[in-house]
Image (spheres, rainbow, N blue to C red):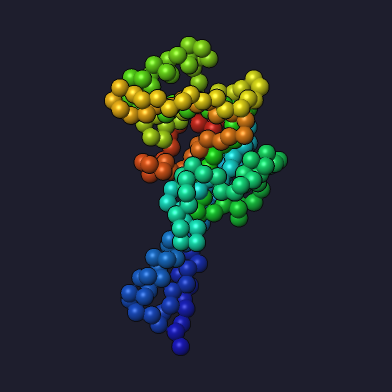
Amino acid sequence: MAVLAARAGGAAVNEGATDRERCVEEVLALAAATERERCAEVFALRCVCFQNGYRPLAVYSPGAKFRGELVKGAGKRPVTTDWLKQAMQDPPWVVGDSRRVSSLALNTGLLTGEMSGLDIDVTIQDVVDQIVGRIEQTLGPTPLRRVGNAPKILLCYRAVEPFTKLSTPRYRMPDGSEGHFEILGAGQQVVAFGLHPVTWQPYRWLDCSPRWRF
C-alpha cells in the first residue's frame, strides 16, 4: 500500500509513487499553494481599497473559462449580473469573506459614481497628451492615473455629485486607428488591478494608487 508522507508546508507526497509521479504531485501542490497566496493577496487588496473609500468588485481574469468555454469580455467583465448591487453593499460583497475570491476572477474593478473615470481610448501619444492637457486645464491634475494598454490612459476624479456615463462617438484618427473618449459615472466600473486582456500585463498606476491613502 502506498504511504503518504507530509512535506514542509503541509503538502503530502506519495512515497510509493515513481519519481515522475512525485514530481507531478509536488508541482500541483506548489500550484495550489501559489493560487491560495494569490487569492489572499487579491482579498487584502480589495479590503484596502474599501478602507480607502472605494467600492471594489470581482472581474474575470483574462483567459478565464467557464464550463470549458472562454468567458466573453474576460479581463474587463464583472463576475455576476448583480455586481452593482453587490458593490453597493456595506461592506461590498467581495470584501465580506476571503473565500469569495475566485482564481477565475483575480482582476479587481472599482465602482464609479462618486469617483469618475475619464477614459482616453486613443492610440496616438500626441493626441492623448493633448486630451490630458485639456482635462487638466479644466479640472486640475489628478494623482490617480492608470495605464493598461499604453498610450491609452484613465484619469480618476472625485465627482461633486454622481452622474451617468458621458461618451463621444468613435472617430477615425489620421493613422487609421479609432479613437474614443468617455467619462464613466454612476452604475459603471473601471478595472483597477489585475492583467489587461490585450497586453496581459498588470495595470499600472503612474503616481498614486487606490491602494494608498492620500
Query: Residue reaching furthest bottom?
Result: 1
Query: Residue reaching furthest top?
Result: 137
Residue 61 in view of the camera: no
The location of residue 206, given as percent across then percent down, is: 43, 28
Residue 104 in view of the camera: yes
User: Depth check: 98 or 89 in front?
Assistant: 89
User: Depth check: 79 or 92 in front?
Assistant: 79
In the rendered image of this protein, does residue 81 appear above or below residue 134? Answer: below
Residue shown at 36% from the left, 20% from the top: 127
Residue shown at 55% from the left, 45% from the top: 78
The location of residue 71, given as percent across then percent down, is: 48, 52
The location of residue 105, given as percent across then percent down, is: 51, 50
Q: Total marks drawn?
A: 0
The quarter holding residue 48 reads top right
Residue shown at 48% from the left, 64% from the top: 9
Whether residue 110 sits left or right of residue 19 in the image: it is right
The location of residue 86, given as percent across then percent down, is: 66, 44
In the rendered image of this protein, does residue 8 appear above or below residue 149? Answer: below
Whether residue 11 sits left or right of residue 127 in the image: it is right
Give the position of the C terminus as an image quadrant: top right
In the rendered image of this protein, does residue 55 appear above or below residue 8? Answer: above
Query: Residue reaching furthest left?
Result: 175
